[in-house]
Image (cartoon, rainbow, N blue to C red):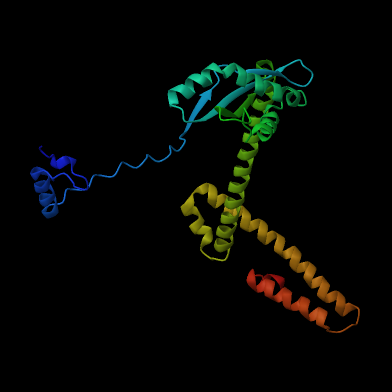
Amino acid sequence: MSTDPAGRPGTRPPVPRQLGRRRWWHALFPPAELPLPPAPPPPVVPTTVTFRQEAPAPILVPAKGDAFDFRLHTTYDWVAQNMTYDELRFRAERYLGWASGIVRERAVDLARDHEPHRSHDLERALNNRLGGQRWPREGNLPYFGVLLRVSPDERVRERLRPYWEDRIKLECEHELQKIRAAQADDLTRRWCAVLQNLEDDPVTAHAARLTGEQFAEVFRRYVEERREAVPGLVKLLHEAVRGHGDLGMGPSEYTEAWDAALRTYERQHGLSERAN
């Protein structure tokens, strides 16, 4: 009877020689560690896409009295997330009518409070009311804001044209008169200084001819008129001084002041001998 080593109880099967060699090899040269699995990608941050859309035609809203219309020229600023620029542009063009309806609905009542020629006032009021708002107000759908420019009815523009033409003409004439007045004032001051300097110079009567006969003639008349006026003033001063003496008041501070002023004026104008 033969015995089977594998069937012996409490015994282990022998280790294959090849497996023992592998374990011996791994002990000397351990195998390389397996690479770690790749990290998951970071969460995608929503990208913001914007598109500015100019409306091809103005929105008409009635002005006060309903006889004329205001023309609303609208610019829409569309904003979206996780969307391409082309897709946002497609949606903006598709929903342009809806956006125009929202703007018109919010502008009608305010437009009827403004007179037909007050387009600038309406433009300021509409931008103050609609600026900073967005539609739709909630959700993650693309939304838009609006910027408005308002122009009056063409019939109103034609009626305003003569008014503005006259106003522009008046303002231009006013500015022209201001320039002329400033130039005349500057010229007068300069000629006054020249004449005063020439009058104090004994050779001015001849030197004035160097600038031209016309100036020489004007300067001669100026000097003569000034000198003709001086004797009258001197006579008046003399009478004032003598008048205090005729009253028997004697020399006083008042009389002495007049006399000093008289003598000073005579010396400045070379009239000492003439007065005597």
Instruction: Work out whether 98 lies above or below 227.
Output: above
Q: Quadrant of residue 62?
A: top right
From the viewer's perspective, tell me whether residue 158 is left or right of residue 242: left
Residue 157 is situated, as x and y percent measured from the top left of the image, at: 66, 20
From the viewer's perspective, tell me whether residue 157 is left or right of residue 109: left
Front position in the image: 243 or 50: 50
Residue 66 is situated, as x and y percent measured from the top left of the image, at: 77, 16
At horizontal 66% and vertical 22% (from top left) the residue drawn is: 102
Instruction: Work out whether 78 lies above or below 45.
Output: above
Front position in the image: 82 or 121: 82
At horizontal 10% and vertical 50% (from top left) the residue drawn is: 25
Q: How many marks?
A: 0
Residue 34 is situated, as x and y percent measured from the top left of the image, at: 23, 45
At horizontal 57% and vertical 18% (from top left) the residue drawn is: 96
For this orientation, the residue located farthest to the front is 1
Front position in the image: 116 or 80: 80
Where's the C terminus, which quadrant? bottom right
From the viewer's perspective, tell me whether residue 240 is left or right of residue 265: right
At horizontal 49% and vertical 58% (from top left) the residue drawn is: 207
Front position in the image: 273 or 99: 99
Query: Is there any visible trace of residue 274 in the rendered image?
Result: yes
For this orientation, the residue located farthest to the right is 247
Instruction: Work out whether 181 lies above or below 268.
Output: above
Q: Quadrant of residue 133?
A: top right
Where's the N terminus, which quadrant? top left
Q: Quadrant of residue 222?
A: bottom right
